[in-house]
Image (cartoon, rainbow, N blue to C red):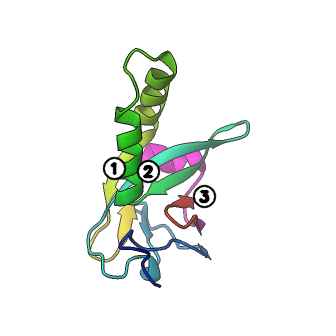
């Protein structure tokens, strides 16, 4: 899997990893090339009428870009404040272990219905977990 301008891996394709009893999910090997332990931002992501439909998983570069955009918004803007609260409440940072697994927080796994299996869908610069 080639890297584009050192922007990190390209997350594409679809995988269906198992989820172990500790709620650990294996990140696909071809999404981890050259990376050891990596910090990801998990966000409970809405879809249509479902308040928490999936987990949006942001790797370091995408998470950094989001933080920069959020922190550049004016503090007096009510919509910006609402967005900060939403993302602050619905997000969690996790670090992959040496085997490339991330542990899903219990409340997030329950919210999106992930139990023994997950579906991981690449979105090029990030991925979703269902």
Secondary structure at numbered mark 2:
strand
Check disc 3: other Cα within 10 Å, few if <14, some if 14-19, many if 20+: some
Label 3, on which residue?
A: 130
Residue at which label 2 appears: 42
Image quadrant in which you'd find residue 71? top left
What residue is at 34 percent from the left and 50 percent from the top? 64
Image position, residue 6 (x, y; %) = 35, 73
x and y percent of residue 62 in the render? 42, 55
* Disc 3 element: loop
Q: If you read the primary sequence from the N terminus, does the residue marked by circle 3 or circle 2 appear first? A: 2
Counting from the top left corner in percent of width and height, residue 14 is at 62, 73
Neighbourhood count class around disc 1 (C-alpha, 10 Å): few under 14, some 14–19, many 20 upward: some
Residue to which mark 1 is pinned: 93
Task: Please state the horizontal and vertical placement of residue 84, each as a whole percent of the image.
Answer: 42, 29
User: Closer to the camera: disc 3 or disc 1?
Assistant: 1
Determine contact: label 1, label 2, CB under 8 Å.
Answer: yes
- Magenta segment includes 119: yes
Q: Which mark is residue 11?
A: none
Quadrant for the C terminus in the image: bottom right
The residue drawn where x is 46% and y is 43% is: 107
Asked whether 101 or 7 is in front, the reply is: 7
Q: CA distance from mark 1 to mark 2?
A: 6 Å
Comparing marks 3 and 2, which lies closer to the viewer?
A: 2
Query: Is 12 left, or right, of 42 in this rendering?
Result: right
**Which stretch did the figure color magenta?**
106-121
Above or below residue 52? Residue 118 is below
Q: Residue at horizontal 26%, vertical 75%? A: 36
């Amino acid at each position: 899997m080639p890297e584009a301008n050192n922007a990190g891996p390209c997350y594409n394709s679809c995988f269906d990893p198992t989820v172990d009893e500790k709620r650990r999910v294996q990140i696909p090997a071809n999404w981890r090339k050259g990376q050891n332990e990596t910090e990801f931002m998990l966000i409970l992501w809405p879809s249509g009428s479902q308040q928490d439909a999936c987990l949006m998983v942001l790797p370091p570069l995408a998470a950094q870009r989001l933080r920069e955009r959020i922190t550049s918004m004016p503090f007096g803007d009510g919509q910006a404040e609402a967005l900060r609260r939403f993302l602050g409440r619905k997000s969690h940072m996790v670090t992959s272990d040496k085997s490339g697994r991330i542990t899903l927080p219990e409340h997030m796994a329950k919210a999106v219905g992930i139990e023994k299996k997950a579906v991981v869908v690449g979105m090029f610069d990030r991925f979703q977990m269902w």
